Amino acid sequence: MHQPPDTRYVEDRSPGSGRLTPRAAFRSDAPGIPLDGEWRFRAAAGLGDLTAGFDDPGFDDGAWDTLPVPSCWQLQGVGSPAYTNVTYPFPVDPPRVPEENPTGEYRREFTLPDDWPAGRGVLRFDGVDSCFAVWLNGVRLGDGKGSRVPTEFDATEALRPGRNVLAVRVHQWSAGSYLEDQDMWWLSGIFRPVRLLSRPEGCVEDFFVHADYDHTTGVGTLSVETSAPARLSVPELGLVDADPAGPHTFAGVEPWNAEQPRLYEGELTAAGERIPLRIGFRRIVVEDGLLKANGRPLLLRGVNRHEWDPETGRTLSYETMLRDVLLMKRHNINAVRTSHYPPSSDFLDLCDAYGLWVVDECDLETHGFELVGWRGNPSDDARWRDALLDRMRRVVERDKNHPSILMWSLGNESGTGENLVAMAEWARTRDASRPVHYEGEWDSGYVDVYSRMYADHAETELIGRGEEPPTRDPALDAHRRGLPFILCEYAHAMGNGPGGLSEYQRLFETYPRLQGGFVWEWIDHGIARRTADGRVFHAYGGDFGEPVHDGNFVADGLVFPDRTPSPGLVEYKKVIEPVSIGFGADGRSVTVRNGHDFRDTAYLRFRWRAEDDGEIVAEGVLDVPVLPSGDRVSLPVPALPPVKDAERALTVVAELAADEPWAEAGHEIAWGQTVLAPAAREPVPERLLPTVAGRGGRLALGPAAFDAHSGRLLAVGGVDVGGLRLDLWRAPTDNDRLGDRIADRWRAAGLHRLTTRTLGVESTAEGLTVRTRTAPAGADHAVNATYRWRSDGRSLWLDVVAVPEGKWPCPLPRIGLGLSLPGRLDTVDWYGLGPGEAYRDSTAAARLGRHRRTVDALQTPYVRPQENGNRRAVRRALLTGAGGGGLEIVGLPSYDLTVRRWTSAELDAARHTTDLVPGDRLHVNLDVAHHGIGTASCGPGPLPQHALGAGPVALRLVLRAL
Ligand code: GAL
């Protein structure tokens, strides 16, 4: 007879039972058996639905399904993902959780080989969400919580020669869920690898590598604490079979830093085992109010990274992790905050090897308690102390040997309290070599850096100056004022944006106390799904019928779910480039500044090119002397041929001179551009044609036809033009919709339902003048526009002057013209800023040149459709199609351009990319200006200089049929 399973551990605050002491993660040549692959699996609806005797080795699971390990079961068709940001998806009644507690029963067999050594067997789980119990051959080994920190059990007594049966019961909800309220999908299961490890008699269970670097002497000091006698070799440093404890000193070692991640290969040998080591010498300190590595202050160009894959959720392949690291390195990123839990150890190995500073964060967030006034918050309740301390221990012990780890972070958004203080104290005692980070306590009493999220530019500047308001507790003010400042989250990369990055970077580069920050966040956590007709889209909160959810707030990354870089990442790469290239006001000198923290510029090659109206007229290599970090040099610009009737741009690019492990020679790191000669003006022709009456109620002016009644343009040459009118609307971006909700004000002002009335159509000997009034129903604010059309027979000149009337209640989304063109014009060639999307406060990465894209490629597929794809400062665009013909649109001097196969209203109405169905017309916007993008979805809106107030504007265009 089987007893009903004892599941009291589920609602127990304890971190687990029967577990082994936390220790470093490492590989060795001791045998191990990977236990990944297909396991037998049964999904139980709750604790009342468990399989009696499932842990019995004789239990027949032949009728069960299978499930891959590792995986998140909701992404394998078992149950559904659910997304909330702050809200717990169950009543806040700690430590109790719902009776409907989806539970996975996992079983598998494995064979212990005959040559399995004597000694201990350890069963290691790298990540199980959120709570589990383990049986080996019917023997209960223990249970655990702490989804993203490892758990090990001693399997020695239960192991059998030959066939072994492992049974694991995993519960979606547990007391631990209260500690895991991170802003992400709720997913469950054995989502990281499982392994049986042999621990030979007398082996080293744990070790701690201390590899210090003294930048004043260049001496490296190495000492490895081991839990058992061992020998240490680092052949490259002449150390062979030495006492690990040392300390061993080495003159002239090359230190580790994220720019030059020098690792020394070593080996620890103990009874029955060899453990490879990768040692990086470095010293991290907070000194004189600055966060320094190897004596130099750091400027963190960081991102927050969740582990995410659109198909497999938080189960990531090694290739995916490597892809993240390579993408980061290629985009000038030098730091990662592992929001908000420690990542797979493989990711940290990659950070060591390729060079990224890591803020390693504990698996802790209790944000949902904020919604109940922080009552019962585990951070300040002694009954949870063990659970919190246990999590901190498991991070620090697992990861302590990674040179890339810069700081320990206690967790995220967990209020404040004594348990956090205890975690900080424990971490500092265990590892004095790394500062402690936590953002949730602004007085910063128990941390070593002052960290905040989403502080706006003005507040950040105040902090940079050291003029911020005092701490709430006066006793902590002096401490906090002495701390370096980082923005552990800023520039919320949700949808279109973030705007305002350049202005943040300028502050970071101006005030030494501001040591950079981490953009929120690296990747959109969209889940790949298919429409009935097989088109892929990315699902977000609410798409799985969740009663409580936070919509597409889960899609706020610099890369799309499939890891395609978004325009935000391209912008960030430019803004944080470690070398700045500028030009003298007179255009005669070019200045190169090395903004690296450590590296000199010897690894870079500088190329220049001069372009006239986008055509290369001269190019070469700029001879820049090797600049040590922090140095700058001014050089004369290269001698150039004279320029005639063209706009001349000079571009200087810094690129890799040779292959780096993370990118090939020629990969671009930084660039600068200046306009040396302004564009030649296209003068209004002297001989102008009159407007003449045409057939069918039309007016003709040169190549153009107009409706005589409304004065609307109908065609230019063979190209029919639809609906040309003044337009103010854009499909609100996430940053327009959320935060200060400017889009609500736009809708209240009727900007999405403007109507236009013709006030007058006047044919003259020199063209046509049309006056219109554009206004929404029910309001008395309007924009009056005068269109003056002129033609010399070939070209059509348009001067638009728009003047707002009445009291405008809000800034405008944009102002310009909207029109439609035949859908066959599927390609756009333009000379202006590009090649990517740009808005007035996200324009750093766009450069002047000739660019070409298909209409489809001009669209940016934000997970939730919204305004996108704007090309700025377009001087000239040609819209052409396969059938020949087309339209040229010249701006005098320029305009902003979007070209889409759907209207702004359709874009606004769409909820997923697959809702957008191409029509047979192109919808083209030719704009004077847009409102800035900002980052109000979480953080500040556009800076005042990027707001588009209602005021008079003028636009001059020339249209020509091709
Ligand atoms: C922060 C939080 C992140 C994320 C972000 C908004 O408050 O730490 O986890 O929720 O806001 O996307």
Image (cartoon, rainbow, N blue to C red):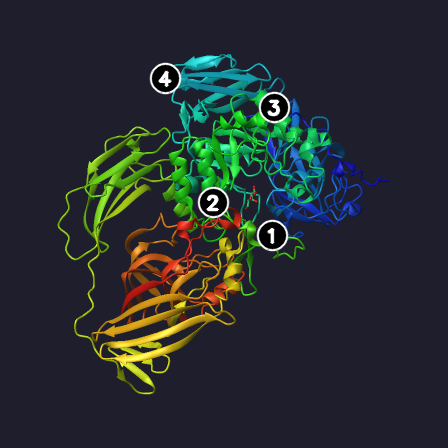
- C-alpha separation, residue under disc 4 versus residue under disc 3: 34 Å
Side of 284 relative to 592 (left or right): right
Task: From the image, tell me which residue sits under label 2.
Answer: 491
Viewer-proximal residue, 1 or 892? 892
Helix, strand or loop at disc 4?
loop
Q: In terms of image quarters, where does ligand 1 lie?
A: top right
Quadrant in the picture for residue 429: top right
Proximity of marks 2 and 1: CB atoms separated by less than 8 Å: no
Q: From what the image shows, is residue 708 above or below residue 520?
A: below
Q: Which mark is residue 550?
A: 1
Residue type, label 1 = Asp
Q: Which sits earlier in the primary sequence, circle 2 or circle 1?
A: 2
Q: Mark 3 — residue?
A: 425
Q: Residue 894: x percent and y percent?
A: 29, 60
Residue 57, can we see it? no
Task: State the CA–CA distance, disc 2 to disc 1.
Answer: 19 Å
Specify whether 519 is left or right of 4: left
